[in-house]
Image: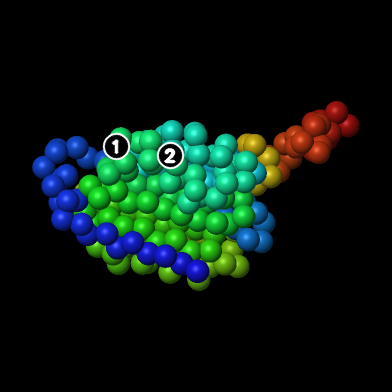
């Protein structure tokens, strides 16, 4: 079952006069039902979107916090998800204690694929979110709802692909369909499996065409970094294949 909030509250327009440019424009937090991997993909008109927006923890969930971001929604939320509480329950509790919630936007998915999102009444127009099985997509300062609709469509139609590729396709679709009203500058895709370290952590911190550069780096990462990650130690194999080969 999916849920959509195509929010256009009049109170949101008042925030335009503040002069503050939020950090993030669109993101998608997601879980792969085939592999159990968790991840976040995002793009914004400001630098270093990956530093603040994307928070993923193996065995807990994935959180994207944006608009006027509050990282504690992730830092406090992920342990609660890991304890088995639902994203809706966790976000309801944390936002109730956040005095800045009306300028927040957040999407959250847990390890079971349950999803929930929130868009504050004063997030920059156009702003809204959409949740479905295994994902929460959200955007602010977009040209319109068509951007988020394109992100959701691409993600839902690519279930046969790995999660990192699906998130990258979603980022590309968002940029191609209007994205941020102020252009685009940075993008990120991060994915975690059953280990505490990420399988994918690809970031473009400052580029003219960040989705395009993210695609290039994704290819570099796949060819040159991913094989190394697959040979690292794991909880079940503390030596790891790379050390095993090195030691003969």
Question: Percent x, y for residue 244?
Answer: 84, 33
> Where, by quadrant of the figure, is residue 93 drawn?
top left
Applied colour scheme: rainbow
Quarter of the image with the C terminus in it: top right
Q: Is residue 140 left or right of residue 219?
A: left
- Check the image and report above or below for 114 versus 76: below
The label shown at residue 94 is 2
Identify the secondary structure beneath mark 1. Answer: loop
Q: Residues within 10 Å of mark 1 (few under 14, many from 20)?
A: some
Compare residues 144 and 74 and report the one nearer the observer. 74
Identify the secondary structure beneath mark 2. Answer: helix
> Where, by quadrant of the figure, is residue 98 drawn?
top left
The label shown at residue 100 is 1
Badge 1 vs badge 2, beta-carbon distance below 8 Å: no
Q: Marks 1 and 2, how far apart in space?
A: 11 Å
Residue at the right extreme, as displayed:
248
Residue 40 visible (yes or no): no
Q: Tell me what residue is drawn at x 30 percent, y 63 percent.
A: 6
Q: Tell me what residue is drawn at x 49 percent, y 48 percent.
A: 89
- Marker count (numbered): 2
């Amino acid at each position: 079952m999916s849920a959509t909030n195509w929010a256009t509250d009049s109170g949101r327009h008042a925030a335009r006069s503040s002069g503050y440019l939020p950090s993030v424009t669109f993101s998608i937090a997601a879980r792969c039902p085939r592999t159990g991997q968790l991840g976040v993909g995002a793009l914004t008109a400001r630098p270093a979107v990956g530093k603040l927006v994307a928070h993923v923890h193996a065995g807990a969930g994935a959180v994207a916090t944006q608009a006027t971001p509050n990282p504690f929604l992730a830092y406090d939320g992920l342990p609660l998800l890991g304890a088995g509480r639902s994203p809706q329950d966790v976000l309801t509790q944390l936002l109730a204690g956040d005095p800045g919630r009306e300028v927040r936007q957040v999407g959250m998915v847990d390890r079971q694929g349950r999803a929930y999102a929130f868009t504050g009444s004063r997030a920059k127009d156009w702003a809204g979110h959409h949740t479905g099985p295994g994902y929460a997509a959200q955007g602010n300062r977009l040209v319109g709802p068509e951007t988020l609709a394109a992100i959701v469509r691409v993600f839902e139609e690519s279930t046969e692909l790995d999660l990192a590729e699906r998130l990258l396709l979603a980022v590309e679709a968002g940029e191609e369909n209007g994205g941020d009203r102020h252009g685009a500058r940075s993008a990120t895709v991060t994915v975690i499996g059953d280990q505490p370290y990420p399988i994918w952590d690809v970031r473009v911190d400052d580029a003219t065409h960040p989705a395009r550069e993210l695609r290039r780096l994704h290819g570099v990462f796949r060819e040159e970094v991913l094989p190394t990650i697959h040979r690292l130690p794991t909880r079940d194999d503390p030596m790891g294949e790379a050390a095993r080969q090195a030691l003969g």
